[in-house]
Image (cartoon, rainbow, N blue to C red):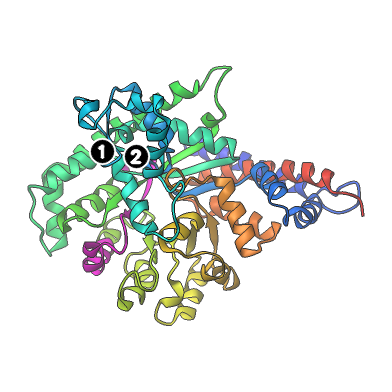
Amino acid sequence: MRRLTLAALVIAAIAGVSAQTQRAQPSPRGESAEAATAKRFAAIRSGPLGLRAFLREMPKGGDLHNHLSGSIYAESYLRWAADDKLCFVVATMTIAAGACDAAAGNPPVSALFQNSALYNQAIDAMSMRHWNPSLNGHDQFFAAFAKFGPASSKTGEMLADLTSRAAADHVSYLEVMLTPAGATVFRLAGGIPFDSDLAQLREKFLAAGLRDAVVTEAKTRLDTAEARQRELLRCGTPQADAGCMVTVRYIAQVARAGVPQAVFGQMLTGFELATRDPRVVSLNLVQPEDDPTALRDFRLQMSMLDFLHRQYPTVPITLHAGELTEGLVPPPALSDHIRQSIVTGHATRIGHGVSVMSEDDPFALLRDMAAKRILVEITLSSNDQILGVKGQHHPLRTYLQHGVPVAIATDDMGVSRSSHTHEFVKAVEEHDLDYRTLKGMVRNSIVYSFADPATKARLKANLEAALAAFERRQGARTPKS
């Protein structure tokens, strides 16, 4: 196995060198393909249509921050719900199981396809489509997740949908956030009271069977979902969807608004899975950072991560932190969430990081993040919709100016009504980024991924080859001076 791994790395390294050589080849005008592409980008970037076409074709590497349930468009949920003969509760705009009764206000979801007004109302309620910016985007955004109901349990269909769209947008790698063993963890946590002695609490969960139970549940769920994904995408056949070629890894979600023992149990689950199933590469705290329970227990949760990191030091951690803004929470909550997520929570990547300049001594924090190479997963659409932060008020350029690595991510593009391409367009239009900066961010999305070394080497080599081919095409389109 070691020989195979080393051989794979050597092959990938050779491929990477070849890609770099290809990229360095000069165009017929004597300039490198990269320089010609940068020139073309500068010429078309002010035109929205040309910019979008350019960025749609551009290889984008990986999406390191996306929640599976929030990445699916409402139209897909409604279609699956209709296929499963589920109901739609009109009063709450929610998909639900049970007996349908149109007269009582819960018709079958299939009826929405014959009622365009109700169908469109449902999509608006389950997403940010036609959202009124003068209203509370934060609450509408997070409320959308409860409206998917049982349709969001179709993990295989969701993976097929997500990977197919990723491939069409020239994304080659996804780190998908999901809850791979939630039922077992919550069942165990219901019988284990919280113990401030975290070593004892860990032993109680392990003695209750967490290790074997969660690994079994997660493996079964992921195996089933991936088999369904391959079936839907016709992988391995001449008609295979391009989504079959997208590499997927998983990040275990921890619901930060739960009771302490449940939060600890989910954290422990994430660490155990990341050591036992190579498909699970990390864990992350989810749910609104401004939730009252999440705010109250923030330091307790960081101490849990600190303890568990010492037990599982090889498992990387990424954390939502700084998804806050002035007025949303009291000032003390803005002062150290990013810093403590790095120092105490041992995060090597930060999701969002919007409130960085409200932290105590923000410039020291930025220097520290740059020195430690803490990547920030930038999610522009959701920051705009949830927090009302965009353009010059967003810290993307601040991170870049201070040498902090960043990568563009989608977060919940189904709810946001976004795409990988749209996030790149938003980055250029709102932050005046040039081609080489975008290209660096694309490379970061693979370099700072949590993929194993052999997979990362393959992804790097493939990305360089794709970028070289893209630049040759774009360079050839650049008008002569």
Secondary structure at badge 2 equals: loop
Image: 111 above or below 204:
above
Residue 3 seen anywhere in this rendered image of the structure: no
Amino acid type indicated by mark 2: Asp
Residue 81 seen anywhere in this rendered image of the structure: yes
N-terminal of the two: label 1 or label 2? 1
Q: Is residue 328 left or right of residue 413?
A: left
Residue in front for this viewpoint, 13 or 170: 170
Q: Is residue 198 left or right of residue 139?
A: left
Is the Cβ of the residue at disc 1 closer than 8 Å to that at disc 2?
A: yes
Give percent across and percent down for residue 132: 44, 55
Determine the image quadrant of residue 219. top left
Residue at 7 percent of width and 47 percent of height: 191
Mark 1 neighbour class, 10 Å CA radius: few under 14, some 14 to 19, many 20 or more: many
Amino acid type indicated by mark 1: Val
Give percent across and percent down for residue 323: 39, 63
**Which residue is the site of mark 1?**
215
Residue 277 image label: 2
Q: Point out the image quarter for the C terminus.
A: bottom right
The alpha-carbon separation of the residues under discs 1 and 2 comes to 8 Å
Residue at 11 percent of width and 51 percent of height: 204
Determine the image quadrant of residue 297. bottom left
Q: Is residue 186 left or right of residue 45?
A: left
Residue 103 image label: none
Please give the range of residues in magenta: 276-305
Q: Is residue 358 left or right of residue 20?
A: left
Secondary structure at badge 1 equals: helix
Taking the magenta stretch, the answer to whether it contains residue 296 is yes
